[in-house]
Amino acid sequence: MVRRPVAWVVAIVLFVEALGIAAVNWFLGVVVDRQDMSLAGLDPDVMSLSSKLGGVVFGLYFALCGLVALLVALRDRPPAGFGRILLISAAVVHGMLGAFAWGLLGWAEFLFMVVVLGLIVLLLMTYDSPEEPAEPADAVPDVPGEPVSGPAPTTP
């Protein structure tokens, strides 16, 4: 099956992306701090601190999404509850980042975001359908020659 390898790839990509996002934002915070730059009168220390905190929070978010994908890979079971919501939100975030990347950075970054989006959606969709369809609990078995219990058919 393709489910487990996709879950492993998604987990690795999200962990690498978490480190990359955190490192880039931390670097930008250090640059703002060392240059002592100000944007429209904002305090440079606040800008530096907010960039670093934003990078850490965003990195932890992607790391948590990567942990969900890792647990899916290890258990070979679909994500449920909060984990499923996290992966869906990560797919939405990658779609939005892809749109921004197309406009601001270029097609290569857009392509990376779309590939990650596709992997997350593939992870969610491959675990979405069960192996065999389940019958309802109140289903009546079909036995030939025996009458079916239930309301009698009415004739008009």
Image (cartoon, rainbow, N blue to C red):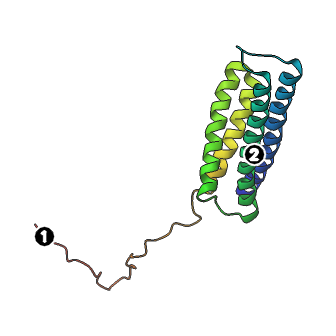
Does label 2 or label 1 sit earlier along the sequence? 2
Pointers 2 and 1 in contact (CB under 8 A)? no
> Residue tagged by mark 2?
60
Residue 155's tag is 1
Residue positioned 81% across, 16% down in the render = 37
Mark 2 lies on a secondary structure that is helix
Nearest to viewer (mark 2 / mark 1): 2
Residue positioned 76% across, 62% down in the render = 74
In this picture, is 37 found above or below 111? above
Which residue occupies the foreground of this view, 75 or 67?
67
Which residue occupies the foreground of this view, 3 or 116?
116
Give the crowd class for mark 1: few <14, some 14-19, many >=20 residues within 10 Å.
few
Q: Residue furthest right?
A: 34
Identify which amino acid the numbered label 2 is placed on. Answer: Leu
Residue 16 visible: yes
Q: Residue furthest left?
A: 156
Quadrant of the rendered image containing residue 68: bottom right
In this picture, is 52 found above or below 87? above
Residue positioned 79% across, 22% down in the render = 44
Q: CA–CA distance between discs 2 and 1?
A: 65 Å
Residue positioned 57% across, 63% down in the render = 130
Q: Residue furthest top?
A: 40
Quadrant of the rendered image containing residue 17: top right
Residue 76, x across and y down, in percent: 71, 63
Give the crowd class for mark 2: few <14, some 14-19, many >=20 residues within 10 Å.
some
Q: Quadrant of the C terminus?
A: bottom left
In this picture, is 70 found above or below 93? below
Identify which amino acid the numbered label 1 is placed on. Answer: Thr
